[in-house]
Image (cartoon, grey):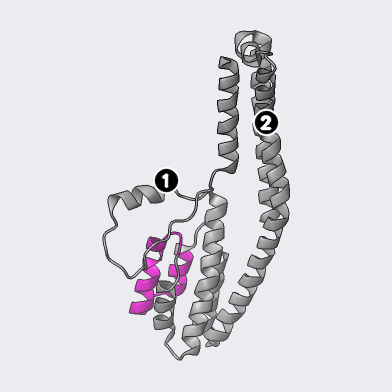
Amino acid sequence: MTNALIAALSTAFAIWLWTGPDPATTRLSKLTSTQQKPQWHSLSRRLTRPNPTRRADAWRQASVELCQALSAELSAGRTPGEALTRAIAAVDFPDPESLRPILAAARDGGDVSAALIAATPPQGGEGLRQLAACWEVSITVGAGLAALVERVATTLRTAQAHRQDVAAQLAGPRTTAKMLAILPALGLLMAAALNMHPLSFLFGSLPGLACLIAGITLDACGLLWTNRMATQAQS
């Protein structure tokens, strides 16, 4: 009875890990807001910090929205600095604090291109780098910034749509890998229900302990391998 209870709890924990909610990017206030965040909000943001892949996707999506907003502001007749300031304030970025130097450069007539490059994250910063190149070309040769930004926005939207299509195609293999990962726990539950005492074997003998370590290792390697292949396919 005890073995069956332990096996049931292990299975429930494995299913919870599989089906539990993924960390989501916390919605942040606008960059122009100076209101002090409560302490519990900072703790919540740290606890819900997305993994590198999700963070890179958030930066790419924010870059697309920034280029679209900037193109609209420029088309409305605003100056580049004012248009960039308004566009940044209208977009929710994963790390808005890192964009404050860009706002300062845009307001004070500084080197916006250099500020964009400095704020570019290691992953997911392709859009900001392309925007910095557009800004530099516009200043150097006098090209129309609105047209350049619109082309960058179109390119980023196309790339984002491709990544989403690949992610949708990889959803099935990822789900299958997670399901296979919890099958050993289900096997323990079935063995305990048949009064075969699997936990006594696994934890009470050297061969059982070796089987347990080997099984956990292979299970973890399978999940890591599947995740690595999926990540490479999306990059």
Asked if one can make out residue 125 in the rendered structure from this viewpoint, the answer is: no
Q: Residue at x 67, y 28 (%)?
A: 186
Residue type (three-letter) at the residue carrying disc 2 = Asp
Residue type (three-letter) at the residue carrying disc 1 = Leu
145 up-or-down from 233: above or below: below
Residue 31 % position (x, y): 36, 68
Residue topped by disc 1: 47
**Magenta region:** 93-118
Task: Please identify the quarter of the rendering in which residue 235 is found.
Answer: bottom right
Decide whether residue 101 is among the magenta residues: yes
Q: Residue at x 67, y 14 (%)?
A: 195
Residue 220 % position (x, y): 64, 32
Label 2 CA crowd tier, 10 Å (few <14, some 14–19, many 20+): some
Q: Residue furthest bottom?
A: 77
- Mark nearer the N terminus (1 vs 2): 1
201 up-or-down from 219: above or below: above
Task: Please identify the quarter of the rendering in which residue 165 is found.
Answer: bottom right
58 up-or-down from 182: above or below: below
Q: Residue at x 46, y 60 (%)?
A: 94
Label 1 CA crowd tier, 10 Å (few <14, some 14–19, many 20+): few
Residue topped by disc 2: 219
Report the side of 161 relative to 66 (left or right).
right
Task: Please identify the quarter of the rendering in which residue 212 is found.
Answer: top right
Asked if one can make out residue 207 in the rendered structure from this viewpoint, the answer is: yes
Q: CA distance from mark 1 to mark 2?
A: 26 Å
Decide whether residue 5 is among the magenta residues: no
Q: Secondary structure at mark 1?
A: helix
